[in-house]
Structures are given as structure tokens and as C-alpha cells.
Image (cartoon, rainbow, N blue to C red):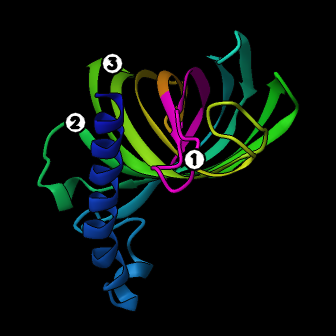
Amino acid sequence: MRIVNVKAIVAAVIFSGLFLFPRISSADSSTRIHAFTDRHQSVSFNDLTFSSGYVWGELKGDEDLEIIPFSVRVGLDINDFAGIHGDSSLQLGIEPFVNTIIAPDRGIEAGINIGLRYMTPVADGVSVFGEISSGPTYFGIDTVEQGDAGFNFLSQFGAGLQVDVTRRMAFNAAYRFRHLSNAGFTQPNDGINTNAIIAGLSFSY
């Protein structure tokens, strides 16, 4: 069941990317110039988020996996494209990351995730959101589950809270469930599940 769910996540994110990116790339030059300010555009850049936190999980052999994440997330407003109106919003997120693995061995986890975030306000200056994403990842240590260090996919879903600090800056915190696997390209491929607490600052444009 776990494998089926992860494949469904990956398929949904890839489909969203294939469906959305042609719409962005087909825009003429005048559309791109005004995409930051023209609210009638289908897709527009609207925030940049810097995040870090703590990731933990358990490997076979009762070894603890610990990671310190760092990511930069580019948020694209796709409300018009998705036909969403009102206070809620839907974002396409592009999130490159370079994470430091600190246990059981030292190494790097690096890649890029693409996904969707749906946000709705619950009070003045306070919003909650749910998100899902997936993408290619280099996992830099050897494990029983995945074998030698190398190429994998990282799929994530979670929920969080965003609180406005100023008109253009907000604090956000979220929990993410993470699943790392290579989609069956090589063996072994038992998968690694981890939990993450992420916090950061978002700058809106």
C-alpha cells in the first residue's frame, strides 16, 4: 500500500507540472514582463521562502537517521489558472534544497521538489496550508534500504501555519512526512520514511 500511495503522489505532481509549465512557457514577452504585477495572468511569481529545520527517522538495524534541511522555495500564484477566487490560494512551488545528513553517517541530500500548496486564512494575518511535492534527489550515504549512495526520488506531504510579520514578510512552520525511494530503478528499494519539522521566512512580491 505504501508503494502505491507514493507512486500516486509522484504521478499527481508530475501531471501537474506537465500541465502547468507549458502555460508558463507559452506566454509572450509582454506577458512575462508584467507577470509580477498583473493579477489577470494565469501564473505569477508571488513569494520566496527560506527554510530549515530537523528531519528524523529510523533505518534498519535500529540506526537513527538525522538530517538538517535547508531549502529555497519559489512560490507561483496559480489561482487564476485553477479558477480559484476569494481569500484562499493555490501555489505551484519549486523548491531546491541542500540538506546535511548528520547520522548515522555524514553526507549530503540534495535535489529539487515541485508541488502544490493550498492555503486558506483562519484569522487576521494567520493562514493554514496543506502541501504535496516530489522530485529527484541525491542521497549521499549508503543504507540497507537503498544500497549505495545515489539517485532517488523524494516525495513529501504535510501541513503548516503561516503568520504575517509585516505586510511583505511572514513566518511559517510545517510538519512534513517524507518518503525516499528510487521508484524501482535499482535494487534494493525498501524506501526510507522520515518526519520533518520545517520553519522559515516567506517574502511576498
Q: What label does residue 187 carry, if any?
A: 1
Residue behind mark 2: 88
Instruction: Determine whether the residue tagged by mark 2 lies in a helix, strand or loop.
Output: loop
Looking at the image, the residue that sits furthest to the top is 62
Tell me the residue at 82%/22% (across/down).
Answer: 104
Magenta span: helix, strand or loop, mainly? strand
Q: Is residue 77 above or below residue 160?
A: below
Q: x and y percent of residue 180 in the render?
A: 54, 37
C-alpha gap between disc 1 and disc 2: 43 Å
The secondary structure type at the circle numbered 1 is loop
Q: Position of residue 86 (x, y in %)?
A: 14, 40
Label 3 vs 1, first from the N-terminus: 3
Give me the C-alpha separation between circle 3 and circle 1. Answer: 50 Å
For the point 36% across and 49% down, the residue is 10
CA distance separating discs 3 and 2: 13 Å
The quadrant where residue 80 appears: bottom left
For badge 1, the amino acid type reads Gln
Above or below, comparing residue 109 to residue 32 in the picture: above
Q: Which residue is mark 3?
A: 124
Neighbours of disc 3 within 10 Å: few (<14), some (14-19), many (20+): few
Q: Residue at x 84, y 38 (%)?
A: 107
- Secondary structure beneath dot 3 equals loop
What amino acid is labelled 2 in the image? Ser
Sequence-earlier tag: 3 or 2: 2
Front residue (pair 90, 58)? 58
Label 2: few (<14), some or many (≥20) within 10 Å?
A: some
Q: Would you say residue 50 sits in the magenta stretch? A: no
**Percent position (x, y) of residue 184?**
47, 50
Establish if 123 lies above or below 142: above
- Read off the magenta span: 178-205
